[in-house]
Amino acid sequence: MPKPDELSPLWIVFPYIPKESIGWRMGAGDDYLNQWLEWWRTDFPADLKEGYQLRWPEPQGWLGFYASLTRRNTAPALDSKSGSLADATNCEYACLKCAHTFVIAISALEAATNLYPTRTDTCDHCLQRVGTGPVKCRNCGKSFELSFPHWHLRCDLAAGECPACGTSYLSACIC
Ligand SMILES: [Zn+2]
Ligand SMILES: [Zn+2]
Ligand SMILES: [Zn+2]
């Protein structure tokens, strides 16, 4: 049972919504997710978080969830040679895998060109890395991951080769 001032984990309240589901982006799932994240980040004392995680271990399918919350609190890794947080701006970003939207900090250089391939920040819903996403090979149908360096500009530029069959995947720059 949750303590009185505590919110139960997402998977307890909505056991029928899988972690990567669109159900977290609409209706009751979306409301509770936002309420829970707000509570976790601002209202829940940091020294109680470890106990909470022990009492509510992540079930199958949610592994890495708590870790992703911690990661999100740290600034994205910005390459000191090509940009700094000093000139960073916030940018609304839609996850390439689950379409969840969230805000990322980008440097002035990234705002004008490519997202750094060294970024380590991830979607807090599905843990897909920012600037990368799954694509499907048009030849063999296998899914693989590619970089989308212009995704923050709403451009789906991507290029690569299917690791299974070698067919090239190309989506031209539209920005
Ligand atoms: Zn996602
Ligand atoms: Zn293929
Ligand atoms: Zn582009």
Image: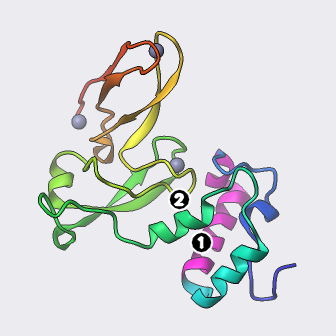
Quadrant of the drawing holding the C terminus? top left
Q: Residue 41 appears at what percent x and percent y?
A: 55, 79
Kindly identify the residue that appears in the image at 12 percent across and 57 percent down.
82
What residue does disc 2 label? 124
Kindly identify the residue that appears in the image at 25 percent across and 65 percent down.
89
Asked whether mark 2 and ligand 1 are closer than 8 Å, the reply comes as yes
Horizontal placement of 49 versus 113: left or right? right
Report the Cα–Cα distance between label 1 and label 2: 10 Å
Three-letter code for the amino acid on which mark 2 is drawn: Asp
The tag on residue 23 is none
Predominant SS of the magenta segment? helix
Q: Residue furthest right?
A: 1
Residues drawn in magenta: 22-41
Residue 106 is drawn in which quadrant? bottom left
Asked whether mark 1 and ligand 1 are closer than 8 Å, the reply comes as no
Quadrant of the drawing holding the N terminus? bottom right
- Label 1, secondary structure: give it: helix
Q: Residue 138 appears at what percent x and percent y?
A: 46, 13
Q: Residue 118 appears at what percent x and percent y?
A: 28, 52
What residue does disc 1 label? 37
Q: Residue 46 appears at what percent x and percent y?
A: 58, 87
Q: Residue furthest left?
A: 81
